[in-house]
Amino acid sequence: MSAAIATSIQGRYGSRAEISDSFGEIVVDVGPADWIDALSFARSKGYEFFDWLTGVDEPPDGFSVVAHVFDPVKMAHLLIRTRVPRADPRLPTATGVFRGADWHERETFEMFGVIFDGHPDLRPLLLPDGFEGHPLRKDFVLAARVAKAWPGAKEPGESDHGSPSRRKMLPPGVPADWAGGPAVQEEGDG
């Protein structure tokens, strides 16, 4: 862990930043109000290479937004994180600090529903037109798992070739009370 950047961050943000270590890399957690300033400060300290930005769904409270930046001179990595509430997941855009954040913010908006205020073109990037929902949220129902039977056996010896039938279960990711789910089949029905 680079003591210099950790000391600089602690000196600038004090108790507003929590610094930790993750597998030998520095992780800085800041509040949403310090998000852009923390990215700008890291850039001013040599972390000039923007690598990636993504979201992490952490129910029930909200989402973490994580950016990975890199200092090519010191060969040092830095993760900067913040949390936004599920009810109103908003952050200011980082495109003014790192132009490369544009694509990553669009993807995070589309997959998690995090809105990046001030983004120059916050529109869908990967999903087909008319797609509803945010597929990387943990509460997103994976309808394809209901529409098509789950492939393969779950245990050795279990197959569609004469083995004893078991109670059919909904596939992973499909809530038990989901109205579009298949009828649950009881033992001996198969």
Image: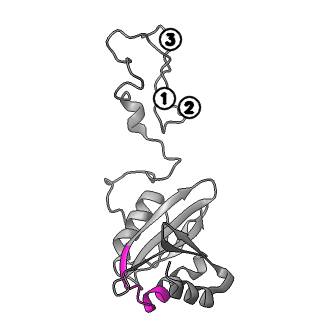
Q: Position of residue 190 (x, y in %)?
A: 42, 11
Between the C-alphas of marks 3 and 1, the distance is 14 Å
Name the N-terminal-most of marks 1 and 2. Answer: 1
Cα–Cα span, label 3 and label 2: 18 Å
Residue furthest right as drawn? 15
Residue 32, relative to residue 64: is it above or below?
Answer: below
Note whether residue 86 is visible: no
Taking 177 as reference, is 105 left or right? Answer: left
Badge 1 vs badge 2, beta-carbon distance below 8 Å: yes
Q: Between disc 3 and disc 1, whose residue precedes?
A: 1
Residue 70 versus residue 40: which sits nearer the camera? Answer: 70
Q: Amino acid at mark 2?
A: Ala
Earlier sequence position, callout 3 versus callout 2: 2
Q: Quadrant of residue 100?
A: bottom left
Label 1 neighbour load within 10 Å: few <14, some 14-19, many 20+: some
Q: Which residue is mark 2?
A: 176
What kind of residue is marked 3?
Glu
Residue at 58%, 82% in the rendered image: 34
Q: Residue at x 47, y 36 (%)?
A: 172
- The residue that mark 3 highlights is 187
- With 134 as the anchor, is 123 left or right in this view? left
Foreground pick, 38 / 149: 38
Q: Residue at x 55, y 83 (%)?
A: 6
In the image, residue 21 above or below residue 132: below
Question: What residue did someone put label 1 on?
Answer: 170
Other-residue count near label 3 (Cα within 10 Å), few / some / many at <14 / 14–19 / ≥20: few
Whether residues under marks 3 and 1 lie with C-beta atoms below 8 angstroms apart, the answer is no
- Residue 44: x and y, percent? 44, 92
Which numbered disc, 3 or 2, marks the residue closer to the eye?
A: 3
Amino acid beneath label 1: Leu
Span of residues in magenta: 40-51
